[in-house]
Structures are given as structure tokens and as C-alpha cells.
Amino acid sequence: MQIQSPFELVLFGGLGDLALRKLLPALYLLQRDNRLPEGKILCLTRQALSDDDFQERIRASVRHQVPADCLDENTWAVFCQKLRCVTLDLDDEAQFEHLKSALSAQDINRLYYLATGSDLYTQICAGLHRHGLINAASKIVLEKPIGHDFASAQQINAAVADYFAESQIYRIDHYLGKETVQNLLVLRFANSLFESQWNQRYIDHIQITISESLGVEKRAGFYDHVGAMRDMFQNHLLQLLCITAMEPPARLEPDAVRDEKVKVLRALKPITGDAISEKVVCGQYDAGVSEGKPVPRYRDEPGVDIKSMTETFVAAKVEIDNWRWAGVPFYLRTGKRLAERACEIVVHFKAIPHSIFPLQHKNTMANKLVFRLQPDEGIRLMICEKRVGPGMNVRPMNLSLNPANHKQTRVPEAYERLLFDALSGNATLFLRNDELLEAWRWVDPILKNWEESEQRPEPYTSGTWGPAAATLLLAKDGRLWDENS
Ligand code: BG6
């Protein structure tokens, strides 16, 4: 697939945190790989900037975010020619004309990217419509979280649907663009070896962790109203769960894949009432030491309400009520200020029924398949081997499923892949309306319960693996989180 040329990419929130840290560096890397044809990238900002200031801000962020060996003057020169700064204050109707005059009058490949809060999506779409800026060739990318619960997500989706057909809407979840997620699809559906084992007969349980060592950083204004459930769990974690648990799609096509993911979401066992405190843990970080430095508690971070009840950690035992996964718990967790930055999907296979080797403890030696999404992507299989020497001693060993030569290729950033896909019209890795709503439907009762109970999230020390209740969540089932096993 290729990006149809010329293209126009219109970034709302064009110099915001996401645009500067992720989107513009990813576009630069696409340019460097000669995958960006002729076109324009319009960054919409409220403040008027001189061309020099505008370019310098983007250049500084590209320098900071892109690996040094990918920086070169020629690429920058070509990339820079595509950049335009357009002033647009959404509350000033007349300013949409600035945008209109910067866009082509033809129906060309145009992508609107809404890197703003989802409370602005309706206003943006209505403004584009009033100024005749939407046509059949236009597409729109919506950043997460879309809404703050089921009802608001439904409302936003319905409003956007007044202006764009579902086939023109790309709901992004950047975790689906990560290389190892693609590899998980290949490993599952291009190998009969694993797929034949991928069910309750052979799998004991699955753990999915997205841990961050960073705290809330400069995003308190956003995060303190959102929290880990809406920021990470409802989208990234549930999407990773879907890709791990879905049935094989008939084809690698958008609706075939999304049909299977939505079936998983519909089969999630609801967690309501008393089950919430049994199966879901929420925490908030306390002061501690992170990456060797003392760090403050969440409530003392700049911009955070001193009485904030916002959760910075969530762990849950999730069950899927279907034939394949009956009795196989999925333990999901995410948090800020945890012991390390990592993202892993760990498939724990059942232990052998009986060991014939004297020193082999059958449970701790059970096979594990680990998909590591970050920081160092890779897949490894933990199997047992004989320790060299006398006797019959069995020990675990990790078999890397990524030969060294793969590591010589630069692993593209998730946003590189997803921006390319959206610009070239491939929606496979983007969410459909019904998926988004099913995910909200499942988390809604938990969020409502937390709000109504006004129960404070359990504190945990920064730099650890979260609150004690998270350890207990698995201990109750006779299991351990992977870092302890
Ligand atoms: C974003 C969240 O979606 O993902 C952030 O809003 C989080 O809070 C980020 O830090 C993590 O993404 P990554 O790719 O760095 O793991």
C-alpha cells in the first residue's frame, strides 16, 4: 500500500504534547524512509508563530525524539517544506477560513488528525462541515480516550457520524501499532504450533502488564480527570487482550479483524457489585524512589488536586465467557511510577501433569511464552532443558524467537505505522465504533462504583510494583505476577 499523492494532513493540536513528542517525529521518520509522498502537513495552533519559531519547535522535538542516526539535513529540508503553521482558534468561526485557504480545493487525500481532548471533536467536525471542508476523500483520526464513559462516547461517536461515514473514521490506539503486536498476530496465525495450544486445555492464565516508571509529568491537567482506567485500561490493555484472545479472522482485513475483537469484548464477564472489590484493584502512587531519584507522591505533583482520588494504577482479573477461554483468567495491570517501564503479554501454559525428574518443581517450570512490546521488543519461549553434567537436573531456559539479524533493522515507532496506515486508507489496526462502545460498557460499572463509593485508591510506594492488593489478587488464585515467579 502507498500513500496517495498529494496528501494533506491536518493536525488539530498541531503543536501540542502528542504532536511534538510522537506525531511529528513519526512523520519525519516516514519521510526519511521515503514513504511520505508529495503533500502538506498543516499544524493548527491557537497562537500565531513566525515561520522560524514554528519550524524551530518542530526541529527541536524531532532532534530530541528521533534516534541520532536517523537525523540528517537532507531529510529535514524535504520534510520542512511540507510543514505549514495555521492559526485557528476554534471559538472564532472566521478563522476556519485560514484553514480553508491553506487547503486544496480539490478532493485530494486529506486526513484530519484530532490530537485534542475528545470534548472538542464535535465542535471541530461541525466547523469543518460548515466551511465545506469535508468530502468523500476526507478521513479523520480520533485520539483516545474518546469520551469519559459509555454515554459520552456514544454521544461523540454519533456526532462525528453526522459528518463522516464510519469508513472515514480511524479511532487510534497506538498500542496496536507496536511491532510486537503485529508479531503476535503472525505468531498466532502463521504457525499451527502455537494456535493449536491457544486455549483453556493448555493455557493456565495470561498476564498483560503495561508499567511505566514515569509519573504524571506535565499532564496533570488531563490525567487528574482521567486516571489509569480511562487512560490505559479501557483502551490499550483491552486491545492487547483482544488481539491475544480473538479467534482467527478469515482475512487480514479491517472488518474481519474488528469483528473478532468485538466478539471478545462482548464475551468479557461483567464485573459489577461486590465482585469489583474482589477482582479490581486501584492504587495511587506515594513518594518513593524512581530510577534512583526521590520522587513525590501523586497528590503533591504540580497541577494535581491535593485530595485527588484519581487512580494511577489498576489491576484486574478479567474472564472471557467463551469456549476457548473458559476458566483461563487474564490478569491485566497498568500503572505509573512502577518499578520499571515495560509492556509484556505473558502466556502461562499449564504445568505438566506429573514430573519424572526429581528436582523439577512442576509448577514453576511450566512453559511461558513472553511477548515483550517494550522497551526491548521480542518474543521468548521459556522451556525446560537438562543442566549439563551428571544427574538429570532440569532447569528453565529462554529461547529467543527473534534471531539476532532482526535486531539490526530499526523497529518503527507505533505512530509511524499507524499514520502511514491512516494516510493510505488501511483501517485494520484502528477501532470500529462498536468496539469502542463495548469496551466502555465493560469498564463503566467499575468507574461508577469507584465514584459512588468514594473509596480512596490504595497507596503504593513509587518504584515498586503497585499496591499489596495487586499481589493478593493473584495470590488468592495461587499465582504470582511474572516478576515474582
Ligand atoms: C498514552 C497515555 O496513551 O500512552 C500515557 O495517555 C502513557 O499516559 C502512554 O504514558 C504510554 O505509551 P508508550 O507507547 O510510551 O508506552
Image (cartoon, rainbow, N blue to C red):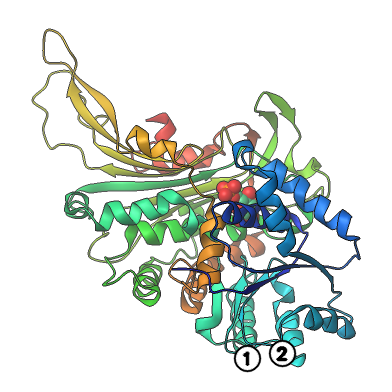
Residue 62 located left or right of residue 483: right
Question: Given contact means CB atoms under 8 Å apart, are the residues at marks 2 and 1 in contact?
Answer: yes
- Seen from the viewer's position, the closer of residues 369 and 441 is 369
Q: Where residue 372 sits: x, y (%)?
A: 42, 41
- Seen from the viewer's position, the closer of residues 247 and 328 is 247
Residue 104 located left or right of residue 271: right
Residue at the (11%, 10%) spot, across then down? 391
Q: Residue furthest top?
A: 390
Q: Where residue 404 sits: x, y (%)?
A: 36, 32
Residue at the (36%, 75%) spot, across then down? 259
Compared to 222, does 1 lie above or below? below
Q: Which mark is residue 129?
A: 2
Determine if residue 481 is in view: no
Q: Where residue 345 sits: x, y (%)?
A: 40, 46
Q: Which mark is residue 355?
A: none
Q: Earlier in the sequence, mark 2 or mark 1?
A: 2
Compared to 359, does 442 lie above or below? below
Compared to 401, does 200 lie above or below? below
Q: Tag 2: residue type?
A: His
Residue at the (83%, 77%) spot, across then down? 90
Residue 356 located left or right of residue 320: left
- Seen from the viewer's position, the closer of residues 483 and 37 is 37
- Seen from the viewer's position, the closer of residues 85 and 80 is 80
| Quarter occupied by the N terminus | bottom left
Q: Tag 1: residue type?
A: Asp
| Quarter occupied by the C terminus | top left
Q: Where residue 341 sits: x, y (%)?
A: 56, 38
Residue at numbered disc 1: 162
Helix, strand or loop for disc 1: loop
